[in-house]
Amino acid sequence: HRSSRRRRLAGIAFTLPSMLFVGAVMAYPLVYLGYMALHTYRPLTSSEITPAGLSNVTALFTDSTVRSSLRVTLQFTLASVAIEVVVGTACAILLANVMLRLRGRLGRLFSRALASAFIVPFAVPAVAGAYAWRMMLDAQLGPVNQLLGTSIPWLVEHPLLSIIVIDAWKMTPFVLFVMLAAVMSIEPSQYEAAALDGAGPVRTLFSITLPSILPIMLVTGAFRAVDAFTKVFDTVFATTGGGPGDDTRVLPLVIWRTAFTHLDFGSASAQALLALVISLGFGVALMVLQRRNR
């Protein structure tokens, strides 16, 4: 008992300085963000930071731009995450079947090459992938319209759908490999028992595979929701710029424009706090799902 207590105290002593340093580095921006949300700072009109009380926070509830951007961001997050989880899980199950059925050295090489091909979209930088899709969706020269035999300006007529597809294309490999690990961790004895009972592929899928990976699927979806809600800026900025109108004006883009275009750092800080609170909500949902999974 004493030795375990000493090891515990030694572990705390070694990790405490780094934990304090990381905590201070993370805490300072948050504290300063809260401070700026309670103050007015517009460098174009005055170089002074003046107290504003809760005016910046209460303005969020009456600002139509914030409300519309919040609606667009939530629509984007829910749609893109749903596509990523469904498509990524389906591809993971198919890839697992291929990897388990292939035998020999050649089979292993083929399965590794196939898995490597899936990770390419995730490895491409977000801005580079967004510009590539912008060229692909071009109304006149884009291969998408040439393949469909149409001349639709996708980023103008269907802007939200376009950025949802672009984000799903990039992030589906992440979900795929997480779910692939979940599928590969299922005990083979369960499938052997199902085969002895005469269960077909469809019944095996819905009675063994999906129930076994459902907790991981939910946790992955919640994690991706947090990530998609806060990191949609680069894709939108490189493709539609928030337009046409406010169809793709997401909350991170509104925060950036408020801070660096209008130079209203107090309002931008309040908007960032709103995004942080919503992200914390997704984070709480993630922790609840993890606890239930345990």
Image (spheres, rainbow, N blue to C red):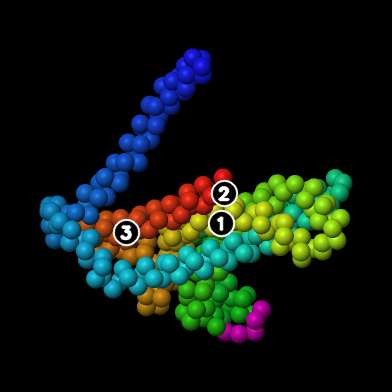
Marks 1 and 2: CB-CB under 8 Å?
yes
Reading the image, the residue beneath label 1 is: 218
Q: Earlier in the sequence, mark 3 or mark 1?
A: 1
Q: Nearer the viewer, residue 10 or 271?
A: 10
Q: Earlier in the sequence, mark 1 or mark 2?
A: 1
Task: Please tell me whether mark 1 sits on a helix, a strand or a loop.
Answer: helix
User: Which residue shows up at 46% across the image and 54% down it?
Assistant: 285
Q: Would you call the spot at circle 1 few (<14 residues within 10 Å), some (14-19), or many (20 or more)?
A: some
Q: Which mark is residue 293?
A: 2
Q: Nearer the viewer, mark 2 or mark 3?
A: 2
Considering the whole magenta stretch, tell me its main secondary structure.
Answer: loop
Q: Distance from label 3 to label 1 (Cα)?
A: 24 Å
Q: Amino acid at mark 2?
A: Asn
Name which quarter of the figure residue 244 lies in: bottom left
Tell me the magenta residue range: 147-151
Q: Nearer the viewer, mark 3 or mark 1?
A: 1
Q: Position of residue 122 (x, y in %)?
A: 58, 55
Name which quarter of the figure residue 170 lies in: bottom right
Reading the image, the residue beneath label 3 is: 274
With respect to residue 96, does 22 lie above or below?
Answer: above
Q: Nearer the viewer, mark 1 or mark 2?
A: 2
User: Which residue shows up at 36% across the image and 32% down it?
Assistant: 21
Q: Position of residue 166 (x, y in %)?
A: 54, 66
Q: Residue furthest front?
A: 197
Q: Amino acid at mark 1?
A: Leu
